[in-house]
Amino acid sequence: MTKLRHMKKSTRTSFFTYGLVIVAFLIIQILRGTVGIGSLLEGQLIPICAYIVMAVSLNLVVGISGELSLGHAGFMSVGAFAGCAMANGLQNLVPSEPLRLVIAILFGALMAALAGFLIGIPVLRLNGDYLAIVTLAFGEIIKTILTNLYIGVDANGLQASFVNDTTDLAEGGIALIKGPMGVSNTSARISTFVAGFILVMVALIVVFNLVNSRAGRAIMATRDNRIAAESVGISVTKYKLMAFTVSAALAGAAGTLYGCSQITFSANKFDFNTSILILVFVVLGGLGNMWGSVIAATALTILPEALRQFSDYRMLVYAIVLILVMLATNSPAIRSFFLRIVRGGRNEDGPSRSAKKEAAK
Amino acid sequence: MKKLRILSLAMAAALSVSLLAGCSDGTATTPDTDTSAAPNDTTSTATGAAFKIGGTGPLTGAASIYGLAAQRGAQIAVDEINALGGDIQFELKYEDDVHDPEKAVNAYNALKEWGMQISLGSVTSKPGEATSVYNFEDRIFALTPSASSTAVVEGKDNVFQMCFTDPNQGLASAEYIYNQGLAEKVFIIWKNDDVYSTGIKDTFMAEAETLGLEVVGDATFADGNDQDFSVQLGQAKDAGADLLFLPMYYQPASLILAQADAMGYTPKFFGVDGMDGILTMEGFDASLAEGVMLLTPFNADATDEATVNFVTKYKELYGETPNQFAADAYDCVYAYKLALETAGCTPDMSASEICDKLIEVFPTITLNGLTGDGSGITWESNGQVSKAPKGMVIQDGAYVGMD
Amino acid sequence: MDFSSLLLGLLDNLIRGLSLGSVYAIIALGYTMVYGIAKMLNFAHGDVIMVGAYVCFFAISTYGLPPVIGILLSMVVCTALGIVIERLAYKPLRQAPSLAVLITAIGVSYFLQNAAQLLWTSSPKVFPSVVPKGNLTLFDGQLSISYLTIVTIVVCVIIMLVLTFFTNSTKMGKAMRACSEDKGAAQLMGIDVNATISITFAIGSALAAVAGVLLCSAYPSLTPTTGSMPGIKAFTAAVFGGIGSIPGALLGGLLLGIIEIFAGSYISTQLSNAIVFGVLIIVLLVKPAGLLGKKIREKV
């Protein structure tokens, strides 16, 4: 009986989230087809999709797996650089844009997953804030490496160099990654809003299926009590690594989607501040709460643009709004109102109310 | 589940309230005595008989010094032109891009919604690379004050620059140093995550090789690593360099000068136009910059009437000495005035009509601007500017022309 | 290259590293104190440094006050600022999950940076040195150490000693340690936990003011974002040495500075940041609680 109920609840949450995304997508598509949504919002659609996927994937690590990661933008940049390089490199071989985008996204996701796996092995041995600082460190290292990487392709094949640019491209060659100059998308601006929507749906399906599977319950068990989980024979490292790698792959896919929507970007775009920004989406939306992440990512991406009327005071107002929202959702007055939800939130580094609630049911 | 939803609803409500507040209180929170020239400036005549000029630049964040300078320079020009009350009237709006290509596209789109007819592009290079593509696709003419990378104008018939391109500066610097016999051994310190710095350094190296100017080494720095230059200076000293070439903006340059001084290392220093502004830094010890050479199109200490007038106004309004970004933006607005007059454009024309006319007119006009060095500013049809970079040397805390 | 000049080069780099590292160390001390007691990563700490530097800059350059008064003034202002931030932004979240506090701290950091930009513009200001210029020369002028470097290192060591004495031997310090061990038990013993946390913030912020003045004396370019990168580096340094440990923050800061300079000198300036973080990762993998951190046994 309780099991049935549990299933229903989690299924309901996932269907609610899918519904939310589909309805939002349809409304926007109808508006775009009829009255238009204005070029400002139009231009933001794909980045918003990318940020939603980033938030959902980080939520898998922070909310479900319970590890604070401060270097998530690093995986996004791996995906963006690898995916866009692929998309640019294949422009003559694969003329069909949707197909090229799919290949690019898969390649970006694969490279990011590889990075996530390699980083995850050592990192996940650590706990709490030490894990956070190591992910931050890896984020910075990825940034430095990409800033010093030069890759070009011409008729003779692929050329790559590190630190000093020694690539010497023949006529008609394409510089895929230009070190500090990053990537210039001459012919790889192939991301579309529909592709973004599909990627958001895929990310949600992957995450929900993982969370509601045997593996997902194992991941949450290691989060709630590592020792107890180990004592019943759950391999903590394996499951944490699984969550971390899946999350990195999704972040890589989001990075490719983002990269292929931009005219130009460099590794500096994916710095510590971007990692923090995505973490803000996750915390604001609620740990473990996927539809919260979707809404928070959307709202906080639009917010700075909506505040343009404030002109010079824009970012100041943004900071104040951020502080006030955090206080409003976490202060004792409102807290006592949600006392039951908060119950169990004493574990300082652990998941917050929503995740616990989900887990507790 | 239900309570969970209430919590999130409360949060969402708080967010939407703030969004709404953003829309309704926007004008109320902008103080009347706003010295920073709010984008929706009231002094511009908004009678529908004005051209709408838009530009993006970093108005907040670490790079905001450049964006704000350009915004203010352009605003002064617009106010002057509107005060004259001629046929050409302007309405200027600058949007913040935080020196980020993604945000620059947002800023550009916001301007498009506002009804921008002609554009001042973006202030910085990387965002400029992004917005110029949209300028090209939307057929909105752009004249950027300071986005100097070649990628900004390359392949776009309707994007023009007011500043030298980066390669030009590298070329001119190498030639200058070689022709004047300034150095035997050159060492370069450059910023490896900056398009501007990298672009100048690359052409400088190439040109130095052709000329036979010996470059004994180079060292880099990057964002977040831009405070301690002792390593780079140590390498330069060990390499026996007698001239340091510094293709960078003046803030890191000021640190390099101070640290070289503290080390007791005294080579010659040669900067590019980004070095301009070093003397006006609040609290800067001008003796550190004694003998520093730079190529710059603008000199705030010049005594010609136009410059004095501009510098005085800028100081009055904003309490700072204008740098070359402000001067370039000021010139941009006047270049537009000249071009629109020559082409016979009227404010009721669409952006693409204006664009077509300006593409024809721009390569033909000659502007006598603040940054033109007397001989006037002209444009190639590929969008690059041709004006003479002026070699300056700092003596007793002031620029002196060197020939 | 002969042996003696190689050795001199090494020494020279070591001194540069110590000078950079001691600035990191002072900032890291502030981080580590706050973390030890409030168990929160105060990301706004770097921006308090920036405010401290601005106050000192205006006191010295604009109002012509002597440097000592400038430093004291900036310590007072930063202390007040620290207490206000703690009261308004962190205290209501004392029971909240630590991530919520982390995000609030980031909000405070954005706020301080943007407020500073509006108040003081983003034009860089050149900070006047609070220490007389000049060098101490050794080995017939082959090696020179600036007075500023000496002062920075000495100040850093003094601060560390005072803090260690304070936390080990005074009543207030003992209360702090009690709070960091177990807040509930400390309260039962009659310790005012809230007041103790406020005082910790006050001390941390006063240290931030000193750090700001020394940082900007060494690298005299002051902008609203001056504090953010040193803040992150110092945070790294604090973790490096074992967060919560006062001697650890000193050791971590100094080592970080030395590694950064050596990586730049002997390997590559482009990669020096990556090398610093790489070393950090290796250290944490070998010693998961940092160099001097205490390994806390998990109770079953």
Image (tube, coloured by chain):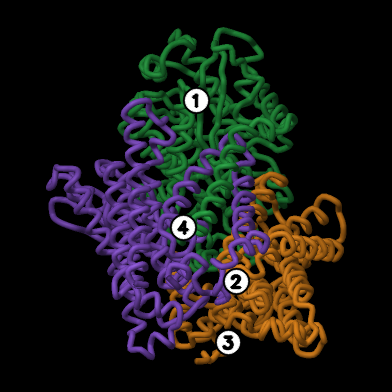
Chain colours: A purple, B green, C orange
Nearest the eye: A93 or A353: A353
Q: Amino acid at mark 4?
A: Ile
Chain ID, mark 2: C
How packed mark 1 is, by other alpha carbons closer than 10 Å (few <14, some 14-19, many 20 or more), is: few
Kindly indicate whether the residues beneath marks 4 and 2 are on one polypeptide chain: no
Which amino acid, by three-letter code, is at mark 2?
A: Ala
Q: Position of residue B350 (x, y in %)?
A: 41, 15
| Residue C99 spot, x, y in % from top left | 55, 67
| Residue A246 visible to the viewer | yes
Viewer-side label of 2, 3: 3
Same chain for marks 1 and 4? no
Q: Which residue is mark 4?
A: A278
Q: Residues within 10 Å of mark 4 (few under 14, many from 20)?
A: many
Q: Which residue is mark 3?
A: C293
Q: Which quadrant of the structure image shows residue B307?
A: top right
The reply to the same-chain question for discs 2 and 1 is no
**Real-space Cα separation, disc 2 to disc 3, in angstroms:** 16 Å
| SS type, badge 4 | helix
Amino acid under label 3?
Gly
Quarter occupied by the C terminus of chain A:
bottom left
Instruction: Pinpoint the chain carrying mark 4.
Output: A
Query: In the visual, does C146 lie left or right of C70?
Result: left
- Image: B10 above or below B365: below
Could you say which disc has been placed on residue A102 in the image?
A: none
Residue with the mark numbered 1:
B114
In this orientation, which residue lies closer to the viewer: B19 or B13? B13
